[in-house]
Image (cartoon, rainbow, N blue to C red):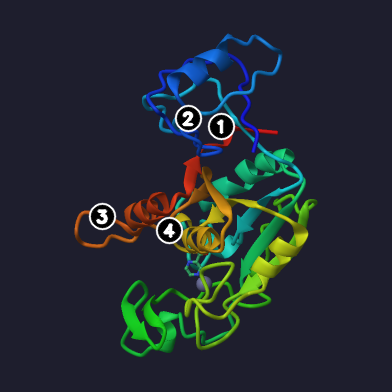
Amino acid sequence: MNCRILGVAFAEPIGARCWQCTKTLSRRAVRADLSRKAGEVKLHLLGDPYYGGRGTLWGAKAVIDRATDILGLVDVQPTFMPGGELAVADGDAVVPAINRLLRLFDHAFATQDWHPAGHSSFASAHPGRKPYDTIEMSYGRQVLWPDHALQGSDNAALHPALDMTKVEVIVRKGFDPAIDSYSTFFENDHRTATGLDGWLRQRGFRRVFLAGLATDFCVAWSAEDAVRLGYEVTVIEDACRGIGIDLGNGRTTLDEARDRLSGLGVRMVKSETLTA
Ligand code: VGL
Ligand code: ZN
């Protein structure tokens, strides 16, 4: 991965790690790079531009490699948007954000939540239970949802305003009546594969960028599996929206998801930090 600086750079490196290529850099190395005033200065990004902390290089952007990077569009379906069955607040805002991001990429894939009627993740399939209750399934804990993403329904289609030009594969998931599937790589038993890993590998993709719905469920679970499968993973937060179930301890599923992702080394960035 090449690191490139666009515009003005400011650095205060203290044995910092480049967040793109993860090399630890010495102050001297960085100064030497900065002093080279070439049109395209090769430099490392110290710190995450999103958080803007100590060591941030202002003006630094991560460069999309159009050949080996891919943008994954997670569950961009009206069923997860205002007016839908499992509405995520402001969920429709991801559509224009994703359409802008797609200009940076040559390749994209999309996922589509695709449940049969009476799916075991629906609260309505469990007498006495209500949406957002949690139950124990054979494969672990499962949140129960309102009926959503019904196969063939208009609200389960990919959003009609989504630019599908660069989408090369659509992965449907959640069609097994007995098991839910948040991740685009494995069903919730963490064993049954969707086949996407093989597709990405055979096509030579190394870095997966994710956007869509919902940050704390299908996006987070996809990101976690992608890291474990060996991809470099970036979640583009302003092109995602989360559900944020209150966990009763002052935290939400969004807080928990963010902690899990940063613990695994998933980058969480804003669209504006990316360039092609
Ligand atoms: C999702 C809950 C149930 C998601 C899908 O797309 O995040 N969440 N089904
Ligand atoms: Zn679902």
Please name whichever residue, 145 or 82, is drawn nearer the observer in this view of the structure.
145
Q: Name which residue lies at 31% across and 87% down.
A: 128
User: Few, some or many C-alpha atoms within 10 Å of disc 4 (few <14, some 14-19, many ≥20)?
Assistant: many
Real-space CA distance between mark 1 and mark 3, rounded to the nearest whole angstrom: 28 Å
- Which label sits in the foreground, 4 or 2? 2
x%, y% of residue 258? Answer: 38, 51
Work out whether mark 4 precedes mark 2 in sequence or the reverse, and give the earlier one.
Answer: 2
Q: Secondary structure at mark 2?
A: loop
Tell whether circle 2 marks a residue whose Cβ is less than 8 angstroms from ligand 1. Answer: no
x%, y% of residue 35? Answer: 57, 9
Real-space CA distance between mark 2 and mark 1, rounded to the nearest whole angstrom: 7 Å
Q: Residue 216, labelled with which disc? A: 4
- Which label sits in the foreground, 2 or 3? 2
User: Few, some or many C-alpha atoms within 10 Å of disc 3 (few <14, some 14-19, many ≥20)?
Assistant: few
Q: Is residue 275 above or below residue 194?
A: above
Q: Secondary structure at mark 4?
A: helix
Work out whether mark 2 precedes mark 3 in sequence or the reverse, and give the earlier one.
Answer: 2
Q: Is residue 11 above or below residue 137?
A: above
Proximity of marks 2 and 1: CB atoms separated by less than 8 Å: yes
User: Amino acid type of disc 2?
Assistant: Pro
Please name whichever residue, 72 or 175, is drawn nearer the observer in this view of the structure.
72
Q: Which residue is mark 1?
A: 273
Work out whether mark 2 precedes mark 1 in sequence or the reverse, and give the earlier one.
Answer: 2
- Which label sits in the foreground, 4 or 1? 1
Q: Secondary structure at mark 1?
A: helix
x%, y% of residue 254? Answer: 37, 54
User: Few, some or many C-alpha atoms within 10 Å of disc 1 (few <14, some 14-19, many ≥20)?
Assistant: some
Q: Residue 251, labelled with which disc? A: 3
Q: Secondary structure at mark 3?
A: loop
